[in-house]
Amino acid sequence: MGESKESMLERILDQASTLGASYADARYQCFDDESIVVENKELKSFSSRRLNGIGIRAVVNGAVGYASTSDMSKNRLDKLSKAPSKLPSLLKARNKSLLKPRLTRSKSNRLRRSIQAMSLLKTKSR
């Protein structure tokens, strides 16, 4: 059998701490869904599925990073635990441009048209 959920989460948190996270939390979520359709006392369809995944949030050098996956393989979980620690270097490399929205002329024109269209819809609905 595979690794328990608790030990997976502990391993991810330990790795985040080793990579320099001053804070980290990891969450496991599981969702079960069943659908049953019956018509005239006759079963027409039945489906069942389980969706699960893990997410990690970490603070590294004052930057908050988040990563998640539904691939529960050991290789993917190892990559997941390293992802938030890459955030500070990404921010530095991009001169923190991820935190500053850039509004180009074409985006500005699209935004202006969207706002105009929304105001037209509001006036028409009144």
Image (cartoon, helix red, strand yellow):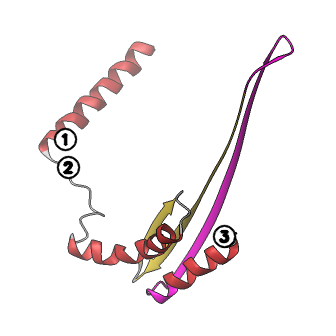
Q: Which residues are magenta?
A: 17-45
Q: Is residue 69 left or right of residue 40?
A: left
Q: Give percent across and percent down for residue 45.
A: 72, 24
Which residue lies under the disc numbered 2? 103
Rendered residue at 33%/77% (across/down): 88
Q: Is residue 77 magenta?
A: no
Distance CA(mark 1)–CA(mark 2): 6 Å
Nearer to us of marks 2 and 3 is 3
Circles 3 and 1: CB atoms closer than 8 Å:
no
**Helix, strand or loop for disc 1:** helix
**In front: 12, or 24?**
12
Q: Nearer the viewer, mark 3 or mark 1?
A: 3
Residue located 35% across and 26% down the image: 118
Q: Specify the farthest residue to the front.
A: 1
User: Which quadrant, please, contains the C terminus?
Assistant: top left
Q: Horizontal placement of 21 versus 91: left or right?
A: right
**Whether residue 19 is situated above or below residue 6 in the rendered picture:** below
Residue type at mark 2 is Leu
The answer to whether mark 1 and mark 2 are in CB contact below 8 A is yes
| Residue placed under numbered mark 1 in the picture | 108
Q: Which mark is residue 2?
A: 3
Where residue 33 sits, quadrant-wise, is top right
Q: Position of residue 100 (x, y in %)?
A: 26, 61
